[in-house]
Image (cartoon, grey):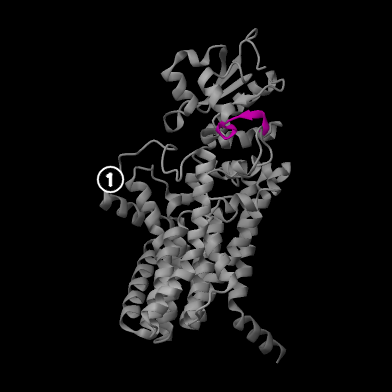
């Protein structure tokens, strides 16, 4: 009897059990990848720590340091912990946030499938596909921002779906906050929220509500992400002088630029590389079935809401179409979306034929194990995260060269290109306040105009990545820019310059 009661509790709270398993998997992944030295191998993992740190540790500290290219929520969460050297150098706190986000994502996916289909098998399938994917598991052990994106957007979509089913006119406080905060995670959330909110309006109208009611509900939902966007663009205008930064931080790649079909294919290809053909195919077919059902049946009109997660594909498509270099990481949200919608497909199949649903779930889970097994050493995301490792190792000689002669002088460096190296240098005792960078406003502008020698004792220049950074480009355009500085060493694409003895130091 006691066993039966315990089993009943476990089954009744399946989404919580799956969340706990996801957190345990995240912890195991962190231990595994920490020992392998891969937690901070991705340059963006280091750069996100720098953005959080620089708000306080800076020549010119202040809220303006939040920046205007990346959305602010991940850095606000990590702002104070990043001031602690241990958390800044290891990324342990930010990784802890990501691990908790793994649990939240699994919980939201399982609960959404349960609410939409009533199927525990579908919920287990959705969460299982998330937990078994090595690309997702790796990211959920790092300080990257995709884990927060998936946790907040999946939770927001869940609450939007529940709100639609409840046929409510007022928007709960938790949903308002979720809509606002999701907008401040990553740009992939923007198309998801736009489609999900539109789906809520459609469902309200299709399920018997008047047109005026649908529009009123749309406005009451849309005002929260709109407010978040407004605050963000105003901050961008104040900090960098532009309402919205869309370029200038990469060299255009002609492979997909202005080629719509090739850009679409690239998103499809990247998604199945990260998740496998079977999972992607079942997810797309399940999503199509949900769309058809929502269009044909009033009672199922709300099914458009969970399928809205596929709208995340709009961002990588737009990026590649605009010439952004290909990054397989941009399809990570699509991988999570496929896991969720595939779970919906299993859940809907279970309502008709339990045996067929069980077979489908088994095929999906076996496919996950075969096509992309957990802790796979050559997982595409893991391989991409290690692109900078050889350069990082080569930069150690630059670090050694700098530390030998450093006497407390400022170091001029472009944070837009070398933020990851600044974080690496924290291991040698350097702080963000030791660097003169773009975030220092007028000080940086003056140094860029007159040259680094009057303002800094050292200069770090990225000469290779993305065609060279701002300093490299400035030196190529004007050889006199580096007057008073001499090149002392280089490695990993980075050159170190030192002020020539006798050159007048800054006043």
Instruction: Residue 81 in the image: state x and y as whole percent.
Output: 70, 49
Does the image show residue 128? no
Q: Is residue 271 left or right of residue 84?
A: left
Give the residue furthest to the top. Answer: 502
- The quarter of the image holding the C terminus is top right
Q: Which portion, as a residue range, is magenta? A: 433-441
Instruction: Residue 49 in the image: state x and y as whole percent.
Output: 62, 44
- 373 vs 408: above or below: below
Give the residue furthest to the bottom. Answer: 1
Depth order, front residue of 146/456 = 456
Q: Which residue is the site of mark 1?
A: 258
Q: Residue at x 52, y 64 (%)?
A: 179
Tally the numbered discs. Answer: 1
Q: Is residue 431 left or right of residue 379?
A: right
Does the image show residue 217? yes
Instruction: Residue 366 in the image: state x and y as whole percent.
Output: 45, 68
Residue 468 falls within the magenta-colored stretch: no
């Amino acid at each position: 009897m006691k066993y039966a009661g315990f089993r009943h509790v476990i089954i009744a709270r399946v989404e919580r059990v799956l969340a706990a398993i996801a957190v345990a998997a995240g912890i195991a992944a962190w231990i595994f990848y920490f020992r392998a030295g891969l937690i901070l191998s991705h340059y963006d993992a280091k750069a996100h720590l720098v953005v959080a740190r620089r708000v306080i540790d800076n020549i010119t500290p202040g809220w303006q340091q939040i920046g205007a290219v990346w959305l602010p929520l991940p850095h606000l969460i990590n702002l104070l912990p990043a001031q602690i050297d241990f958390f800044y150098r290891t990324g342990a706190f930010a990784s802890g946030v990501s691990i908790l986000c793994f649990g939240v994502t699994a919980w939201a996916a399982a609960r959404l499938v349960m609410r939409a289909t009533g199927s525990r098998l579908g919920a287990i399938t959705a969460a299982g596909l998330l937990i078994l994917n090595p690309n997702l598991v790796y990211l959920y052990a790092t300080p990257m921002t995709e884990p927060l994106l998936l946790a907040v957007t999946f939770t927001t979509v869940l609450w939007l779906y529940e709100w639609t089913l409840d046929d409510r006119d007022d928007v709960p406080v938790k949903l308002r906050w979720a809509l606002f905060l999701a907008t401040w995670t990553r740009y992939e959330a923007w198309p998801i929220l736009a489609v999900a909110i539109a789906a809520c309006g459609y469902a309200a109208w299709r399920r018997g509500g008047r047109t005026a009611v649908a529009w009123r509900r749309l406005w009451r939902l849309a005002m929260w992400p709109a407010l978040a966007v407004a605050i963000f663009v105003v901050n961008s205008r104040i900090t960098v002088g532009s309402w919205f930064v869309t370029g200038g931080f990469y060299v255009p790649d002609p492979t997909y630029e202005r080629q719509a079909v090739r850009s679409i294919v690239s998103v499809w290809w990247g998604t199945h590389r990260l998740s496998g053909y079977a999972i992607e195919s079942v997810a797309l077919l399940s999503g199509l079935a949900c769309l058809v059902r929502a269009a044909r049946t009033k009672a199922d009109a709300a099914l458009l809401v969970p399928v809205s997660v596929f709208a995340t594909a709009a961002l990588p498509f737009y990026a590649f179409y605009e010439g952004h270099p290909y990054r397989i990481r941009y399809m990570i949200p699509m991988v999570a979306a496929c896991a969720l919608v595939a779970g919906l497909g299993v859940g809907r199949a279970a309502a008709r034929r339990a045996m067929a649903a069980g077979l489908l779930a088994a095929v999906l889970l076996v496919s996950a194990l075969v096509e992309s097994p957990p802790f796979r050493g050559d997982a595409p995301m893991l391989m991409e995260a290690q692109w900078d490792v050889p350069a990082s190792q080569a930069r150690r000689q630059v670090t050694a060269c700098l530390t030998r002669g450093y006497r407390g002088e400022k170091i001029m460096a472009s944070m837009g290109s070398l933020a990851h190296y600044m974080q690496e240098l924290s291991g040698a005792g350097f702080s963000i306040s030791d660097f003169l960078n773009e975030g220092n406003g007028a000080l940086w502008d003056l140094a860029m105009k007159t040259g680094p020698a009057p303002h800094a004792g050292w200069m770090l220049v990225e000469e290779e990545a993305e065609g060279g950074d701002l300093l490299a480009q400035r030196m190529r355009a004007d050889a006199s820019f580096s007057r008073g500085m001499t090149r002392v060493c280089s490695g990993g694409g980075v050159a170190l310059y030192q002020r020539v003895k006798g050159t007048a130091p800054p006043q």
